Amino acid sequence: MQPPNEGQAKATQDLRITSEPRASPEDATFVREGLALFNVAITGDSYYSPLANFLRDGRGAVLGVLWATSGEGGSTSHRSG
């Protein structure tokens, strides 16, 4: 593997990970469509259904949640919150 050239190194200097609970509809669509294309390419299956898993205490109060989209091919795309 070769070290990055000057242009590549400069392009990666401004990378950052952000948390955006209210992401724009355009960004959300971009991610959803990209995941769908990836999952179909890997599994060959385009059927997906929603999945919600909750962590609850003894009183039934929600302590945590994992949202996902599950396909018949066994792949999942997860988003936790």
Image (cartoon, helix red, strand yellow):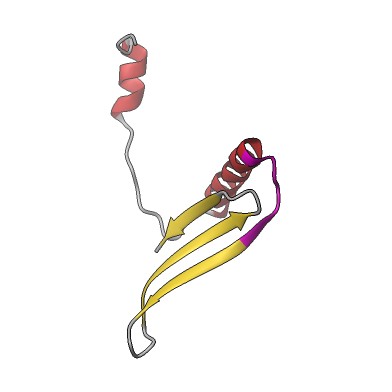
At horizontal 45% and vertical 57% (from top left) the residue drawn is: 79
Task: Say how many tags the image has.
Answer: 0
Residue 24: where, in percent of width, then height? 51, 53
Is 36 located above or below residue 79 in the figure? above
At horizontal 51% and vertical 68% (from top left) the residue drawn is: 52
Is 58 located above or below residue 80 in the figure? below
Residue 72 part of the magenta-drawn span: no
Residue 48 part of the magenta-drawn span: yes
Quarter-wise, where is residue 35 in the image? Answer: top right
At horizontal 33% and vertical 33% (from top left) the residue drawn is: 15
Quarter-wise, where is residue 14 in the image? Answer: top left
Residue 13: where, in percent of width, then height? 29, 27
Residue 32: where, in percent of width, then height? 58, 49
Is 61 located above or below residue 73 in the figure? below
Quarter of the picture holding the N terminus: top left
The magenta segment is: 43-49
In this view of the protein, can residue 23 be seen by the observer? no
Quarter-wise, where is residue 10 in the image? Answer: top left
Quarter of the picture holding the C terminus: bottom left
At horizontal 53% and vertical 47% (from top left) the residue drawn is: 27
